[in-house]
Image (cartoon, grey):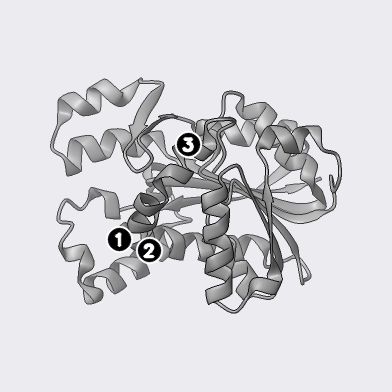
Amino acid sequence: MTDGDTGTDVFGGRTEQWRAWQDEPWGRLRYSLVATTTARAVAHLPGPLRVVDVGGGDGADALPLARAGHAVTVVDVSRPLLQAAVDRFAEAGLADRLRTVHADLDDLRRDSEGAGAVDVVLCHNVVHYRDDVQATVATLVGLVRPGGVVSVMAPNPAMDVLSAAVRRTDPAAALAVLDAPTVHGVTFDHPMRRVEAATVEEALTAAGCRIRHRFGIRCVMDLVADDEVKHDPEFYGRLEELETALCERDPYRLTARFWQVTATRG
């Protein structure tokens, strides 16, 4: 996660809340699914790979790639989250596969070192905190080598509406958010822009990339109002199997809680 000068205060100051969210069934499912989709997106690349996770926070998305034998650099503006990444990799016995960089996306834009030398760039749950999506995507693409993969993920505006109407049974709230430019993120107590996947796809294409995958992360979990049943291991297992089957299928992926787009640099 990265948000300019506010990043340390906004994100690093709520590390405990973030870790608690990750431990809930919806957080675990999000990371399980993204590990699967990201592995699918990079499977065609010969390894070991050089991976940069921009705004990678505590390294939760990068860890499965390290487990697969790849070298990972996590870039984030929050020192507390970067320390959490160091701790996470150490606990997994993978400290030698992790490098951390305390920097913002704007720092990456100004620093040409390593540009075009990376095999995979992840940027998950970042673009909705940025003012200029096109410039952000251009910076990401500039990091990756020709033929390398860029993966971008963000909350899906469609689920803002559906979850209010279906899960919370609040049609007035659903109508209010329908055309709203932002929503308020509870975990980090911070506003988030509502960014469509199509906007990022257009920016990726403009930066010289070819779209490879379009995934939906958590297609149905956020429509289930009963949070208690999600803690039941048997139910969770069945739900994870269903979500894995749905993540790349229309129309289900189109309204998932998160969209994920992967592209190859031309």
Q: Are marks 1 and 3 in contact (CB under 8 Å)?
A: no
Foreground of the two, 190 or 235: 190
Task: Tell me the residue that label 3 is attached to.
Answer: 9
| Residue found at the very far bottom of the displayed protein | 93
**Residue 207 left/right relative to 221:** right
Identify the disc placed on residue 24: 1
Give above or below for 29 relative to 14: below
Q: Provide the secondary structure element on which disc 3 rests.
A: helix
Of marks 1 and 3, the one in the foreground = 3
Query: Label 2, label 1: how many angstroms apart (C-alpha)?
Result: 6 Å
The three-letter code of the residue at mark 3 reads: Asp
Question: Could you say whether the residue bearing mark 2 is in a helix, strand or loop?
Answer: helix
| Quarter of the image with the C terminus in it | top right
Q: Given contact means CB atoms under 8 Å apart, are the residues at marks 2 and 1 in contact?
A: yes
The kind of residue on which mark 2 rests is: Arg
Camera-nearest label, 2 or 3: 3
Q: Which residue is mark 2?
A: 28
* Amino acid residing under circle 1: Glu
Residue at 74% in and 38% down: 108
